[in-house]
Image (cartoon, rainbow, N blue to C red):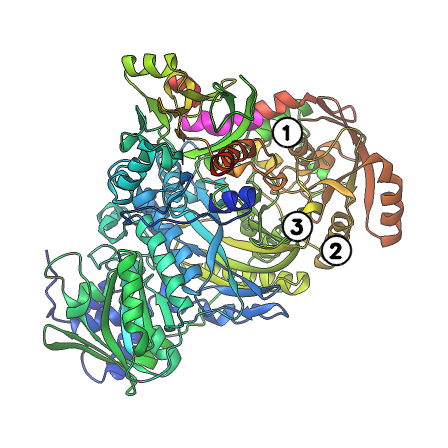
Amino acid sequence: MTVNNTHAITPQLIADHGINDEEYARILELTGREPTFTELGIWSAMWNEHCSYKSSKKWLKTLPTDGPRVVYGPGENAGVVDIGDGDVVVFKMESHNHPSFIEPYQGAATGVGGILRDVFTMGARPIAAMNALRFGAPDHEKTRHLVAGVVAGIGGYGNSFGVPTVGGEVNFHPRYNGNILVNAFAAGIARGDAIYISKAEGVGLPVVYLGAKTGRDGVGGATMASAEFDDSIDEKRPTVQVGDPFTEKCLLEACLELMATGAVIAIQDMGAAGLTCSAVEMGARGDLGIRLNLDDVPAREDSMTAYEMMLSESQERMLMVLRPEKEQEAKTIFVKWGLDFAVVGETTDDLRFRIQHQGQEVADLPIKELGDEAPEYDRPWVEPGTYSQQSPHLFAPPDDYNHALLKLLGSPNLSSRRWVWEQYDTMIQGNTLQLPGGDAGVVRVDGHATKALAFSSDVTPRYVEADPYEGGKQAVAECYRNLIATGSEPLAATDNLNFGNPEKPEIMGQFVAAVRGIGEACSSLGMPIVSGNVSLYNETNGEAILPTPTIGGVGLIDDQEKMARIGSADDRDVLFLIGTEGTHLARSIYQYEILEEESGPAPAVDLLMEKTRGDFVLAAIRSGYASACHDISDGGLAVALAEMCIASGIGATCTIDITYAHAALFGEDQSRYIIAVDDQWADMFAANSEGSGVSFARIGVVGGDRLVINEFVDLSVKDMKDAHEAWFPNFMGAGTVAQAAE
Amino acid sequence: MIAALTLVSGQQPLIAWHTDEELPACDLIVLPGGFSHGDYLRSGAIAARAPVMNAVRRAADSGVMILGVCNGFQMLTEAGLLPGALMRNAGLTFVCKEVRLQIANTDTAFTKYYDKDEVIRCPVAHHDGNYFADAQTLEEIEGNGQVVFRYAEGTNPNGSINDIAGIMNTKRNVLGMMPHPENLIEPAHGGTDGRRLFEAALKMVQSRAA
């Protein structure tokens, strides 16, 4: 079926495009007449929340985005950060929430494809991927289907493309029952003097279409992603795109080969709102007009209308402005890689966005206004309420600490994610130094003797729900801590801000407070935000998700020989706690799993202390003291110790100071680490710690096959490992492959 | 794989394009892993019919050593250079993990630096590694000692028949294997168990050239 391209512009049609009365009045003014059907689609694509950030822009501007290592901050396809020796790391995180709920495999797959394209559009070769996934309650009828589809989709795309997936998060909570989150991260490496951006320069230059053909898939996807869901979502399946990772791989190789010839002036991938968004951005940024002839666009289907072509979100496509004298050379490269190459237009000096189709001009719009004049809202918001602190004695202790620890280790939100990450190729490219399952994924920098990059993705949505400001701070701090725990210097971060409907003042209040917390933490911890994405309207039938501002961080390791791991402790190593005794049980996994409650305040992050301890731990690892390191997060000290034992296969005997045992073991106080130090250096390490003013305690010795903590915990490493590993495969009903084969 | 060959041999391998009709004179041809043509249709099926495979087939006939890893193994079975087929993993999902491999035959150019029945560590990463052959073929390859690697200690990740992880042709110059020895060849990988396979192959190449 084709959409009639001469639709009458009715109030219903305008509303169906997600455009309100005020916005339409502005559109009439800027167009200078009633827009055509195609033009209405173009305005809608450029002005929807997903592309225009109209609700969030005011607040995003408050984030720290600059730093000595930042080459390009937000505004380009991805952030660019200097890692020395003339190299840069290029990275970003982006959501594909709505498509993944509608069609989990393709939704997640194309999310990975989109973020990879953002990275290689800038001239970087992707070297690492992560993904942060939030699903509904494990017992919700859709959850297993969504987990299976999303994980297979991420693997299906990333594995085939050939990028290692080195980290990520998987959480379950009923508030995601009707609206899961799929946030995909990718990072690449490029030479600092060979970065490509979207700003076009020069009049009368060829605008070239590259990659896969245009089909009807994904028409209107960005507008769909800017609306709440209701029960009719199954009808939205045609707005989800279909991925082709092999074409993307060819596109990567062709783009990098083409860039090396010096032919590329500007490049923009076709992501959300496809041809419309990419062409407008190239023109608007470069103060140029763009003229396109849709008859020259490679089409997958016959008789597509101008509207469909302009709004298609078919994947694996690029738009470039090329040096005319290199056009033939460029074409040869693309033909070699089996990709379409077509000159579809040119740059002009009239600042108009003009579209020809079958001899008719179907759109003629002011390009700067399309790109830059999107409405910007200062939406009403209310300051979120806060909770008073709650002393540990208000929380019931467990009947049996061994049982409680095993239960936490085997709980949906703390159990091993091995079932997930074994479906991702974690080793492709041969540079992975730390697989998922530790604090951060680590990939060495190819061609460099000692350098490596660490990657971590973090947020604790139940904290953000309780206190968006502290939760925002904590998301950054936790990411910082995970990077530090590998021995990497945190460089910068990308944010993926997932919230509900911003037209509700309490949701907007969550957003505002969380951004404030993120901004303060990024400033204090020296991690500027260099790229990001906002996903609003994550609601189904009026119920919002937990506010989930995911932070993806990148750290630099000078010498990978001195890197720390979660599981590399040896017999007789001495265990040190960096930080103080646990006290905070509100919003903890202990409260959620053992007391079956969610109440009270989120743990607060003292950013100055966070930085002091982080600096101290980083220096200790870089000096070669740490044979192993792990941060203390979900589940507290006991879970952190158990995770280290499970990872190394060796037990530990610990004696800790205890005021309230359940808080000391399971409290989620922030800014804490465990470091294992070779026994011959332990006294010297302790003396150094005294001098630094950092709180620390010598808490135990590594050895044996049991974890013993005072008189409270005495469990075999095997039992803990079994509990930790069992939940996910049991939940997914997979059993082991060996059994399936018999 | 290119990085691994460069690291072990000290020189860059030549790279052939899929449409090449001829290959340069060489002593070892490696068909690396990766999802050739997206593994659309069947894994390795389209690549097995690429023009370059005619040249690979001629090289195999003339005794040139050929190693196919993962997708390379799938191409070799699809091209008929090795018997049997690689089906979807029994668990129906992609699997990337470390397994144990028993060296079932050390009397080959690729495995002579391993001990008979030695068990080594090796990563796998595939969706279609479930080796299958009909009863008669299986009897033949087992009888001829064509099975070179077997998944050991209960680590069969994909349901392969007889735990088969890698096989050779009867002439013993073509090896196909699903695991990735190239991802365990240096301390940074956490082990070097895969390295001896490349060292043995290069030794053979050098001795032939000498």
Tell me: residue A182, above or below residue B101. below
Task: Name the outermost residue toward the bottom.
Answer: A350
Q: Residue B174: where, in percent of width, then height?
A: 38, 30
Q: Is residue A730 magenta?
A: yes
Q: Earlier in the sequence, mark 2 or mark 3?
A: 3
Q: Residue B81 occupies which quadrant of the picture?
A: top left
Magenta-tinted stretch? A723-734
Chain for mark 3?
A: A
Q: Amino acid at mark 3?
A: Arg
The disc at residue A615 is 2
Image vertical order of residue A607 relative to residue A433, above or below: below
Q: Main secondary structure of the magenta part?
A: helix
Chain letter of disc 2? A
Quick one: label 3 or label 1, which is nearer the N terminus?
A: 3
Q: Is residue A616 left or right of residue A346?
A: right
- Residue A108 pos. (x, y %): 37, 47
| Residue under numbered circle 1 | A646
Residue shown at 22% from the left, 48% from the top: A235
